[in-house]
Amino acid sequence: MGIAWSIMFWPLVACLTLPALLVYFGLHIVRRGVIFVDLALAQVATLGTCVCIMLGHDPHDIHGFYYSVGFTLLGALIFAFTRTEHEHRIPQEAIIGVVYVVAAAAAILLLSRTPEGNEELKRTLVGDVLTVTPSQVGWTAALFVVIAVAHWVFRKPFMAITFHPQTVDSKRWATRGWDFLFYALFGAVVTSFVQIGGVLLVFTYLIVPALCANLLTRSFSAMLLIGCLTSMVGSGGGLWASYQFDLPAGGAIVCSLGVLLLVVGVLRPRRRQVASST
């Protein structure tokens, strides 16, 4: 038991505490209807890492982080200024898809010229949460606190653009500026957590708890609470299954959260029927 605890302690800390901010962003992303923006930003950040490797730097040193953040800011700029009032003609989700595909193709082309290319692509996709270190958890938690404070300070414009877009003029430069700040902060969160859990786990933490919360309530504070509880239960269940059955931790957590979403989706209609019958 002592060995298991020593192996699972920091992955458990990371997966129980850090996803709370991802859940918050997920509620915004689901309501904005840009579901795959995290995959696109993660892939753009990966492209920055690939450029770093091509220039001869180690992807795990500070240069890799700088390149990733720089490319993420470029992606944030693209997404902020491609949201228009003509969504029926050119949906932003289509632009997000194009950015993802082009960034992924460019990353493959760059890494095909390096000996560690395939391993780096695999690590970015699936991650390895069991190898997370205390310094990674501490540094990421500190960054998340700063970003959470920024969102609290600027909560009014962020909430208005996401949940009350009809009251906001999407053509105003100020609105585009708030969108850029939102995506820049979001990109920083995605980029940092991808280093811990990989793209698949980040996407799952963003979307699945937010979907569960939206199925069960309409209050934002209640959605945030339900989303955080969902991510914690899914994380605990996935890590337990990973240890008990010797499974990859990231994949086990993703599947655990998927099962929770299925359970919520099945039980919700019954809850409605019971409420209507009474």
Image: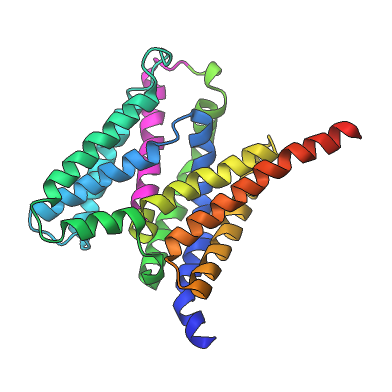
Say which of 243 and 149 sits in front.
Answer: 243
Q: Main secondary structure of the magenta part?
A: helix
Quadrant in the picture for residue 211: top right
The x, y position of residue 97, in whole percent, is 33, 31
Whether residue 61 can be seen here: yes
Q: Residue at x 54, y 17 (%)?
A: 166
The x, y position of residue 252, in whole percent, is 48, 61
Q: Residue at x 14, y 52 (%)?
A: 52
Quadrant in the picture for residue 116: bottom left
Q: Residue at x 17, y 40 (%)?
A: 106
Q: Quick one: which residue is furthest to the front in this view?
A: 245
On screen, residue 41 versus residue 10, left or right, reads left
On screen, residue 57 versus residue 205, left or right, reads left
Q: Residue at x 27, y 46 (%)?
A: 45
The x, y position of residue 4, in whole percent, is 50, 81
Q: Magenta segment: does it hold 142?
A: no
Whether residue 222 can be seen here: no
Q: Quadrant of the N terminus?
A: bottom right
The number of numbered discs placed on residues in the rendered structure image is 0
Q: Quick one: which residue is furthest to the bottom in this view?
A: 2
Q: Quadrant of the C terminus?
A: top right
Q: Which residues are magenta?
A: 169-192
Task: Identify the colour scheme used.
Answer: rainbow
Q: Magenta segment: does it hold 188?
A: yes
Say which of 41 and 3 sits in front.
Answer: 3
